[in-house]
Image (cartoon, rainbow, N blue to C red):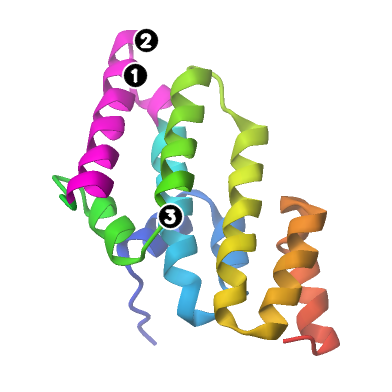
Amino acid sequence: MTVNLSYPAKEVYRYERADFFRCLFVPESIRETFFSLYALNGELARIPAMVSEEMIGHIRYAWWDEALEALYDKGEARGHPLLEALKENAVPKALAVRLMNAYREAYPDPPTPVVEEISTALVQELCPQAGPAWAKAGRIIARNGKKSTGWLSLKLLIAGLF
């Protein structure tokens, strides 16, 4: 059986399997938005390991900063398939920019607490769009933080909440 995954889904599957499987619990109507934000997270997280000099890392983050600005302020998705996905899947500007800024400011260290906060904010913002049961689940997941997005989602599914 062949499964056709979007570019963001492939990237999340390739680099962060736990986030990939968490996204599978999200309603199909908003799943690609989650994949897109998690793929952006992965792209930004890999920069320190991909560069040999600190200045090159700063340059890469500056490129992403400018690319996100062009995407959200001018509607231009230039030179990277992930930018097209962010645009197509309506990833909220505030979350994408906050994520990029967190990585840029923490460089070369990862901004772990901020990443978890952004993930929780995405759940809170998008789950209500998927219906009343998901709105309730989004509130529960947000209250419990990222640690809950996998196992708690499974427990809620089994309990028949959604």
- Crowd band around label 2 with a 10 angstrom C-alpha radius: few (<14), some (14–19), many (20+): few
Q: How far apart are marks 2 and 3 (CA)?
A: 29 Å
Tag 2–tag 3 contact (CB < 8 Å): no
For label 3, the SS is: loop
Tag 3–tag 1 contact (CB < 8 Å): no
Q: How far apart are marks 3 and 1 (CA)?
A: 25 Å
Amino acid carrying mark 3 in the image: Pro
Amino acid carrying mark 2 in the image: Glu
Report which residue position mark 2 lands on.
54
Q: In this rendering, does residue 151 appear at all? A: no
Q: Residue at x 59, y 40 (%)?
A: 115
Residue 160 vs 14, above or below: the answer is below
Left or right of 155: which side holds 107? left
Residue 82 vs 34, above or below: the answer is above
Q: How far apart are marks 2 and 1 (CA)?
A: 5 Å
Report which residue position mark 3 lands on.
92
Q: Magenta residues, as a range?
A: 47-74
